[in-house]
Image: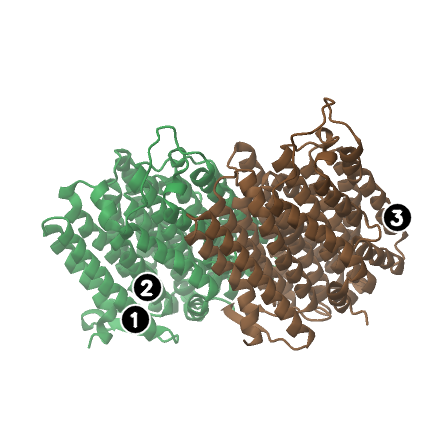
Amino acid sequence: MIESHISLLLVVIPLLAAPVTALLPGVRLPWLTALLVSWVCFALAIWQFALVMDGSVISYELGGWAPPWGIEYRIDIVNAFVALIVAGMAAITLPYALRSVEQEIPKHQIPLFYSMFLLCMDGLLGITLTGDIFNLFVFLEISSLSSYTLISMGRQRRALTAAYQYLIMGTIGATFLLIGIGLIYAETGTLNMADLSNRLPAVFSHHTVHTAFAFIVVGVALKLAMFPLHLWLPNAYTYAPSAITVFLAATATKVAVYVMLRVVFTVFSTGFTSDTPTDDMFLLLGVLGVLVASFYAIYQGDAKRLLAYSSVAQIGYILLGIGFASALGVTAAVVHIFNHALMKGALFMAVGALVYRIGSSHITQFSGVGRQMPWTFGALVLGGLSLIGVPGTAGFISKWYLVLAAIEQQAWLIAAVILVGSLLAVVYVWKMVEVLYFRPASDTGETYREAPLSLLVPTWLLVIANIYFGLNADLTVGAATTAVQVLGGIPQ
Amino acid sequence: MSDSALILLAFLLPLVGAFGIVLCGRWPNLRETVTLVTAALTGLTVIELYGRFQQGGLNVVQLAEPLPGLAISFEIEPLGMLFALVASLLWFVTSVYAIGYMRGHGEANQTRFYTMFAIAISAALGVAFAGNLFTLFLFYEVLTISTYPLVAHAGTEKARQGARTYLAILLGTSIGLQLLAILITYAAAGTLDFRAGGILAGKLDPAWAGLLLALFVFGIGKAAVMPFHRWLPAAMVAPTPVSALLHAVAVVKAGVFTVLKVTIYIFGTDFITESHANDWIIWFAGATILLASLIAMTRDNLKSRLAYSTVSQLSYIVLGALLANQMGLLGGSLHIAMHAFGKITLFFAAGAILVAAHKTEISEMGGLGRAMPITFGAFLIGSLSIIGLPPFGGMWSKWYLALGTIDAAQWMLLGVLLLSSLLNIAYLLPIPIRAFFGKAPDGTSYTKIKEAPVTCLLAMVVTSLACLVLFFYPGPFYELASMVAGVE
């Protein structure tokens, strides 16, 4: 009974729990509710993933209306995989959130915070699961509006401007997406993505379709923070509460990448994208993103902002994978969606733990703290190594496939850029490591205790996951390989 | 115990030891006991492995398979056995030395020091026993990262600066060039296994072979072929035991070991000679031998001079690998062992001088030999072995390398080798001579200075005697090296 409704439950449970959470009294109770919901969702997401792992597709008709008239939830390995990431990251962020949120957010806002958290997770899950492109837009707005609220709850007043900036940029992106959706609806009369992929080829020659494609790609690119449309991201990640930075960095942009994959490879299927200069644009902006954002990261004085720029660079890697439009390239992109969630999650959690004790994310404040908080420091080093792509970590697997994809297409320059990106990562990761460990502690003589266990355990779970998926990539690479076949429109 | 378990044991033992060292951090004597016991057990395990290896037939052990066809696996072959023997035996000697040195010199953070040291040795053994290029690369990177805190040990601005250079060059070359070379190899050959005769022949356009080989030789930054040698002098800010074992033996030899592995088991010597892949890259090795020797002559800081001497000597091995003939490989492989024993003796002496007399500059060491005869005696023996004079082990490797250049009809390179030996004399021998027969700069004679702690002396005596013994009985090292080279 549950099995046939998993996809709907994944969306309905958090949606119903969110208003309830907002009304609950105190601090612990809302947290516990959110925690339970996220763990249930995680379990459901695992179950769902297991069902489609063999490449099969589950179609769920909402309200019994048959597609393409009714809304269809169409689950294949691609969205099951992304849903797994979203639910998994929520399930691991919430235990971390308890202590961190208590410190950062006024008590009376905490129920609201967890309510918004659930809504945000709900929106992200909805985006991945739905098979209807207008429904996708609706969920995109749910996740966006809730994340504006969440970001504005940050400790500093600048969180408000950051949220406002994101609001403006995010709304422009959503509007572009909506215009594009409207245009293709006008052309084809359908909103179902599977149906669209059948009907669109007949009208590929129409300028309207090209315009629609451009609007959708730019709209989604804004949400996934593609260079140079990334300007909202560094501020949003820097000033958001630590737990939200962890969650958004690990999931929000990844879900937008998923939308991009769907649009480019499924909705506008075979032939269309390669006839337009989209691939070249992805490659060019990917290269620029990797290089420019990495350089920016090096010069940041704030650890969260540094990692935020690094995220923009990592999005560049994923775009390169999409731009290659080859089986290896898209495999690399999908694998990196997962691996980057792991590494950035771990890193932002480690920095969050530092912020918890020190009260600042400015790197100059970190002098010598690594010796006082060895576990947090260890997590930061290992997460950093994964970000660099040292063998034995998850990051290496992504880099391996990405460079192989570049070599396959004889794109030597891009292969070099990917490796140079890794080297720039060495620079900005080590900038933190050196200050944390080898600088003498600050003159104030203040000593910091190790972060509390409720922060350390989730952090180290992610760190261990980084190493596990570096030594055993069966799950990630297996899912990505199947995903490439399911997405369609990719030359094998 | 089964053979495969024994291989795993060899590289897991130091890791377990590292854990034990952390646990015993509060009780220095217990901590040092753990280090010594672990080092002794590791040495015995490797010796036992060698015994079984001689009887033939050791299995391949697979630990994990991250990607299909890319496994983390271990196997034993002659070259790895040789490297493992050198590294593990000298680890024990160095541990004995380090106890005297670290206490005598009053170093801080000793627990971290011994822990990272053990991890580094574990990584070095992982490199030695790696069954394919992927595994080798994995442990190569672990080795780089685990030695970083050792280089930055002092935590001063200078130490941090040196460690930064160290990490930047080693990670930079390994990710920027070596990883690219590995990926190209994998894309061309479809495998990264080490196979006799190589995996690239017939798979790679010979025209590209030279470029790929260059990517490997420069990408293996630990081999310190110019212009990627700067990290080695920079690493000399580390405590002397680190310079002695890691930057004269484990880390740098892991580099040249990788070069040898790549030329023998990835390219295959036949493919290299047929495709002329070594044509121009070999001159970088030749130039490094001479230039590093010339720079060494200008250095007054003893450790810095020794570092440049190491850069020069490493390129001997790279040269042997790139000659790609039997004598070259024999000489190159043998030089891994011979240079290790010689150079570690020199570093031990340098550390002993620092601990006992607090002197780092060569110009200040006049007359010091009469106060520290054992130290400078060991230094003399180490120097003679490095120069390659009989009756010391260093002669054999240079002998075969010279034969290799003759076999390849590379007369210029033969000239380079001979000239370099003369330069070795010029920059090494004046140090003990001045110490024994010279005077202190201010004319005083040293009456208060005594020899370094007894464990330091013990270690030096052992390694310098080894230099002597290896001349008369190069036994296991020669056997292994000749198996590598395929000499009957």
Q: Which residue is mark 3?
A: B415
Q: How would you rate the neighbour count of disc 3 (Cα within 10 Å): few for under 14, some for 14-19, many for 20 or more?
A: some
In the image, residue A435 above or below residue A418: above
Q: Is residue B164 left or right of residue A13?
A: right
- Residue type, mark 3 in image: Gly
Residue A51, x across and y down, in percent = 32, 75
Q: Which residue is mark 1?
A: A48
Where's the N terminus of chain A, which quadrant?
A: bottom left
Q: Which mark is residue B335?
A: none
Q: CA distance from mark 3 to mark 2?
A: 65 Å
Residue placed furthest toward the front? B447
Q: Pointer 3 indicates a residue of which chain?
A: B
Residue B282, x across and y down, in percent = 79, 52
The chain letter corresponding to brown is B
Seen from the viewer's position, the closer of residues A369 and A64 is A369
Q: Which residue is mark 2?
A: A84
Residue placed furthest toward the top? B442
Q: Secondary structure at mark 1?
A: helix
Seen from the viewer's position, the closer of residues A184 and B455 is B455
Residue at position x 82%, y 72% in the image: B488
Instruction: Give yes or no for contact between labels 2 and 1 (Cβ–Cβ under 8 Å).
Output: yes
Q: Nearer the viewer, mark 3 or mark 2?
A: 3
Q: How is colour applied across the structure in the image?
A: by chain
Q: Quadrant of residue B469?
A: bottom right
Colour used to depict chain A in the structure image: green
Residue B440, x across and y down, in percent = 73, 26
Q: Secondary structure at mark 3?
A: helix
Q: Secondary structure at mark 2?
A: helix
Q: Pointer 2 indicates a residue of which chain?
A: A
Camera sees residue A315: no
- Residue type, mark 1 in image: Gln
